[in-house]
Image (cartoon, rainbow, N blue to C red):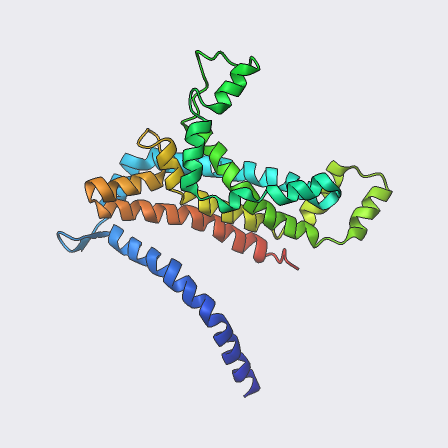
Amino acid sequence: MRRKLSGLLHFFLLAPALAVMIVLYVQPFVLSLYRSVLDEKTGSFTLKFFERAIGTYGRDAVFSLWTSLLATVITIGISIIIGAYLRLTTGTLRRFFNAIYRLPLFIPFVVIGQMMRTFLAPHGLLNNLLSGVGLIDPEFPIEFFNWSGLVFGFVWKQFAFATLLILGGFMMIEDEYLESARSVGAGTARIIVNILVPMAKSVIPIAFILVFASLISCFTYPYMLIGGAVPTTITVDIAHNVTYFGDWGIANALGVISYLMVSAAAIYYMRYIVGRGIYQ
């Protein structure tokens, strides 16, 4: 009897979280999958929408994947460095930096898109700075309205979020470990590589997956920066198929493909991080 009551209690405690997962994630995925294989004109199931989506937008899907992965890797690398600095140092500069690095958290992507269009323009602030110090010819500015600008904006937006997560993991590490490492002559780089990162190995994959998922699903910033250029991101393709072509079949097929990209990272995390008891 006690075991049954315990099971019911666990169910009721988990029910709100399960309901949110079903309503916000499972139900939209199932519905998109159903509509991506259903031909509404004939009422039959078909894979033609996936064939057309891959044939027409396969390059964009690959572009979305590798730019998001690249931006995520750079973001996590920067966040580890910033988190380590904030964990290992003290003083006025540390407090000042700790106060301002979170600013991108409160700026939406639509504002960042406008900012980056000014900052990264052919004759914008960045190119003017580079030409001012003699690194480029002002008559031949660097083109940033492409994958490089996309990655730059992604990293600038997401590094604060990733730093908060990773810094939280670093702050849970006892000072005794760091003092012991310093007492045997370990430098900052060795402390980061051999102590901070391994002891926060349960947090870093979470930050990686959350950042990657947010980037692969981002629409506003890619649309504002590169628009209808080729290649573009899969989210822009979805918007164009819905808005201009009214082709919900291809739009849903592209949505399923983006779901699968994120799910691959989540499955890896659940299988190799949680499944192997990394938290223990």
| Camera-side residue of 122 and 180 | 122
Instruction: Work out whether residue 278 can be spotted.
Output: yes
Residue at 79% x, 47% y is 178
Instruction: Please state, as top left, top right, bottom left or bottom right, where the N terminus lies in the image.
Output: bottom right
Give the x, y percent position of residue 135: 55, 14
- Image position of 62 (left or right of 210): left
Q: Residue furthest right?
A: 183
The image quarter containing residue 183 is top right
Q: Residue furthest left?
A: 42
Instruction: Please state, as top left, top right, bottom left or bottom right, where the C terminus lies in the image.
Output: bottom right
| Camera-side residue of 179 and 55 | 179
- Image position of 51 (left or right of 29): left
Give the x, y percent position of residue 97: 65, 40
Residue at 72% x, 53% y is 173
| Camera-side residue of 174 and 126 | 126
- Image position of 109 (left or right of 45): right
Give the x, y percent position of residue 250: 25, 44
Give the x, y percent position of residue 41: 13, 51
Residue at 28% x, 36% y is 55
Instruction: Work out whether residue 200 can be spotted.
Output: no
The image quarter containing residue 96 is top right
Badge count: 0
